[in-house]
């Protein structure tokens, strides 16, 4: 009994591996090999498929995204924090959890300070939006969770937040000169 994988040419495999590398490029920057791990996981899933996907390129991009989200959630040692009920006492716990990941305590402290500085000027809803987006949630998922009218509204809001942050950073740089 012949499997569909046995009929694939070397050029096709190379092309699919290149697509997987491109789809995973820049995702999950927490370790040097994470993009490679992600693309390898996607190719492995392709090899395990019983039937050849109709549009393999689209399949690779979709599976890369969902695999990235699954990997991020699995690697995350952080407990969920309710932003509405967040207490300053939780800072020590946050630092301890971050220091147990791939980064050291100094990097964890600097990261928390940066996150607090960036998110500090945002409303609670916008903080949740940014954190969910950074965690890999799609605009559709964010729109459903935070009661935005559409995924496009989430994308528009993210762009506005990014513009506001950029403006704040530029104005801060002007004062330093």
Image (cartoon, grey):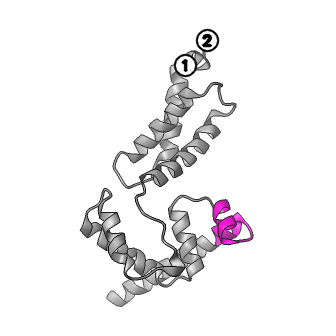
Q: What residue is at 57 percent from the left and 20 percent from the top?
A: 5
Q: Quadrant of residue 113?
A: bottom left
Give 170 or 40, whichever is nearer the viewer: 40
Label 2 crowding class (10 Å Cα cut-off): few <14, some 14-19, many 20+?
A: few
- Label 2: element kind: loop
Question: Residue lying furthest bottom in this view?
Answer: 175
Above or below for 101 versus 109: above
Query: Mark 1 or mark 2, which has the lower sequence index?
Result: 2
Q: Which residues are magenta?
A: 140-156
Q: Quadrant of the C terminus?
A: bottom left
Question: Residue lying furthest top in this view?
Answer: 1
Give 6 or 127, whichever is nearer the viewer: 127
**Left or right: where does residue 94 sit relative to residue 132?**
left
Residue 165 lies, in percent from the top left, at 49, 78
Pointer 2 residue: 2
Disc ID at residue 9:
1
Q: Quadrant of residue 29?
A: bottom left
Give 105 or 24, whichever is nearer the viewer: 105
- Label 1: element kind: loop
In the rendered image, residue 147 lying in the magenta stretch gets the answer yes
Q: Quadrant of residue 146?
A: bottom right
């Amino acid at each position: 009994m012949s499997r569909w994988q046995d009929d694939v040419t070397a050029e096709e495999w190379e092309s699919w591996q290149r697509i997987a590398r491109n789809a995973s490029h820049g995702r999950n920057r927490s370790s040097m090999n994470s993009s490679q791990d992600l693309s390898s996981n996607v190719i492995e899933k392709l090899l395990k498929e019983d039937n050849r996907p109709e549009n393999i390129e689209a399949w690779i991009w979709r599976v890369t995204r969902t695999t990235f989200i699954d990997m991020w959630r699995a690697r995350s040692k952080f407990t969920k924090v309710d932003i509405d009920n967040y207490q300053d006492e939780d800072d020590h716990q946050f630092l301890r959890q971050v220091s147990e990941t791939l980064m050291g305590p100094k990097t964890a402290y600097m990261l928390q300070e940066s996150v607090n500085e960036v998110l500090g000027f945002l409303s609670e809803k916008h903080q949740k939006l940014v954190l969910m987006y950074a965690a890999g949630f799609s605009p559709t998922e964010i729109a459903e969770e935070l009661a935005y009218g559409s995924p496009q509204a989430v994308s528009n809001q993210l762009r506005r937040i990014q513009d506001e942050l950029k403006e704040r950073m530029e104005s801060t740089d002007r004062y330093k000169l």
